[in-house]
């Protein structure tokens, strides 16, 4: 009798818990639908591509969901064997509807339930849309992969007709031409050799042409004769123009954008040489800004000209399109499948480029746009960037991990690249995972253990970029095999539970 009473009591408690859980899921669903609809209506005037409308609505739903902390709800769902909502990026309302329908059937019985399960077509619509968007930008993958391999070309691609054919045979799906280097003659030779490789292999290889943008660098540097290495604790004077001799500052440098010196404030972070030297502005003087070096490698390093400068705390207020970019756009619009947009930070930046593209070809909205996310401001404005761009043309987002790591801090890069992956999947926007992938293998011929692990993680993106190096062909082959194996184990955030053969 005691056992029976206990069982009945447990059942009543479980039924009450399920009813409360079902109400909480319904309340969450109603909140997400209402807030998402309001955001979508604000975006609606920007959406000119019909294929992006449903994606934008799901994106709005995802942002509404992620404005709340649902971790307690996730844990409550898990104990009943239901979805913990941890993989709903591409299908927000469909997942919430499915969970609510399951809860209602567990509490009231199927006939009395008002919530309906989404159909298979409804549930996986976002997954299909992301696949179609990747196809529109990149064409089909080589070797049956889902994740593309994008390769940055060196001048060798212009000089040797067989070079690109070999890379394509190894598994290259797309090429990146960096317009910060070489010229139109070299780029045209690269494209001619690529088209020949396409004809030989009978498949399309997409071309991304990356306009350089306004990269600020050290210009001239002065180092006192008795000093070699710039050390932690040293001071560097960033000057507007050539500085006078000074015993106070054994390290001095001008920069390629001297107007930025006038915008620096005390306390602002500055990174030199792609983060090799990190410091903060200690003082503003008549001659320039005094940078106290707070962190560098043990033993310091040499201060050199033409090295990158990053100012993550300082609004630079400079156009992301330089005069040379505008000149290069004429060639890019004639030859590229995609345009890489460096240092884009706002929706207005996207609108600026789209206006320039419209001046150059009537079907500009068929050109793919690759938004390179490189700064904290770009990260915080990512939703607006996505809507402005994808509302008018095919879009991919590149996680440009080089500058991004410098700007937001190396310790936050892994966290931030995850969030970018989530947001882009919710908007059904393909992601390019870039910077230092298999770098040791490509440059030296031997991969590091960290390289291989990082490359395996890149399989959650839609495209992975390799930089140039003497062992690039081997890097492509290694990445091709790794991506194919990882596809059997992972699809975005979802583990694929294939049969294990090792035990």
Image: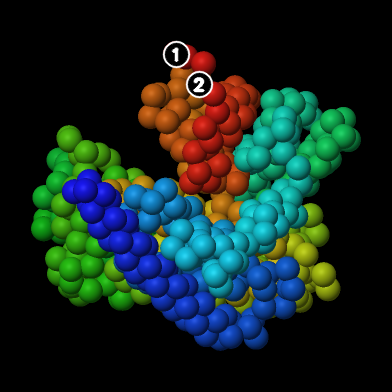
Q: Is residue 344 left or right of residue 24?
A: right
Q: Helix, strand, or loop for circle 1? A: loop
Give the image location of residue 175, x and y in percent: 68, 42
For the view shown, which residue lies furthest in the front direction? 1
User: Can residue 8 be seen in this snapshot?
Assistant: yes
Q: For this rendering, which residue is in front, 198 or 41?
A: 41
Task: Give the labeled residue for mark 1.
Answer: 503
Q: For this rendering, which residue is in front, 94 or 430?
A: 94
Give the image location of residue 318, x and y in percent: 46, 74
Label 2 crowd (10 A; few <14 / some 14-19 / many >=20) = few
Task: Give the labeled residue for mark 2.
Answer: 500
User: Can residue 278 be seen in this snapshot?
Assistant: no
Vertical position of residue 343 compared to residue 471: above or below: below
Q: For this rendering, which residue is in front, 56 or 369?
A: 56
Question: Which quadrant of the figure has residue 302?
Answer: top left
Distance between mark 2 and mark 1 Cα atoms:
7 Å
Q: For this rendering, which residue is in front, 484 or 373?
A: 484
For the view shown, which residue lies furthest in the top direction? 503
Vertical position of residue 51 compared to residue 123: above or below: below
Give the image location of residue 484, x and y in percent: 61, 29
Q: Do the residues bearing badges 2 and 1 touch, measured as CB atoms within 8 Å?
A: yes
Vertical position of residue 406 compared to residue 449: above or below: below
Label 1 crowd (10 A; few <14 / some 14-19 / many >=20) = few
Q: Helix, strand, or loop for circle 2? A: loop
Task: Quarter of the image for the C terminus: give it.
Answer: top left
Q: Is residue 496 left or right of residue 203?
A: left
Q: Is residue 355 left or right of residue 256?
A: right
């Amino acid at each position: 009798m005691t056992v029976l009473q206990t069982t009945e009591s447990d059942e009543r408690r479980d039924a009450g818990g399920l009813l409360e859980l079902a109400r909480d899921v319904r309340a969450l669903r109603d909140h997400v639908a209402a807030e998402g609809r309001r955001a979508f209506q604000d975006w609606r005037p920007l959406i000119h591509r019909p294929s992006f409308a449903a994606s934008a609505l799901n994106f709005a739903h995802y942002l509404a969901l992620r404005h709340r902390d649902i971790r307690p709800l996730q844990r409550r769902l898990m104990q009943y064997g239901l979805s913990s909502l941890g993989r709903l990026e591409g299908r927000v309302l469909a997942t919430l509807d499915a969970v609510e329908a399951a809860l209602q059937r567990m509490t009231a019985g199927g006939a009395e339930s008002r919530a309906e399960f989404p159909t298979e077509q409804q549930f996986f619509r976002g997954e299909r849309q992301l696949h179609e968007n990747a196809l529109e930008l990149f064409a089909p993958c080589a070797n049956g992969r889902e994740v593309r391999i994008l390769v940055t070309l060196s001048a060798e691609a212009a000089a040797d007709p067989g070079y690109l054919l070999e890379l394509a045979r190894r598994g290259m799906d797309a090429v990146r031409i960096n317009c910060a280097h070489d010229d139109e003659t070299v780029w045209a030779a690269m494209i001619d050799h690529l088209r020949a490789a396409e004809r030989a292999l009978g498949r399309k290889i997409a071309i991304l042409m990356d306009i350089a943008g306004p990269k600020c660098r050290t210009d001239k540097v002065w180092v006192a004769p008795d000093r070699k290495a710039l050390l932690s604790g040293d001071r560097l004077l960033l000057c507007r123009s050539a500085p006078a001799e000074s015993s106070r500052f054994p390290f001095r440098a001008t920069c390629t954008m001297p107007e930025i010196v006038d915008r620096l404030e005390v306390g602002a972070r500055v990174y030199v040489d792609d983060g090799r030297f990190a410091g903060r502005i200690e003082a503003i003087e008549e001659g320039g800004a005094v940078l106290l070096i707070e962190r560098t490698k043990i033993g310091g390093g040499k201060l050199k000209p033409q090295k990158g400068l990053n100012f993550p705390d300082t609004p630079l207020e400079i156009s992301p399109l330089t005069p040379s970019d505008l000149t290069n756009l004429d060639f890019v619009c004639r030859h590229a499948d995609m345009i890489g947009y460096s240092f884009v930070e706002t929706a207005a930046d996207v609108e600026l480029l789209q206006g320039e593209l419209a001046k150059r070809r009537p079907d500009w909205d068929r050109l793919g746009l690759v938004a390179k996310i490189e700064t904290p401001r770009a990260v915080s404005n990512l939703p607006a960037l996505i809507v402005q761009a994808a509302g008018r043309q095919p879009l991919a987002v590149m996680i440009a991990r080089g500058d991004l790591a410098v700007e937001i801090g190396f310790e936050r890069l892994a966290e931030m690249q995850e969030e970018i992956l989530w947001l882009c999947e919710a908007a059904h926007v393909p992601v390019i995972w870039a910077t230092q992938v298999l770098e040791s293998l490509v440059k030296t011929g031997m991969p590091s253990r960290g390289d291989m692990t990082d490359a395996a993680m890149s399989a959650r993106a839609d495209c992975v970029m390799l930089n140039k190096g003497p062992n690039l062909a081997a890097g492509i082959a290694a990445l091709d095999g790794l991506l194919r194996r990882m596809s059997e184990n992972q699809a975005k955030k979802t583990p694929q539970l294939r049969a294990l053969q090792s035990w």
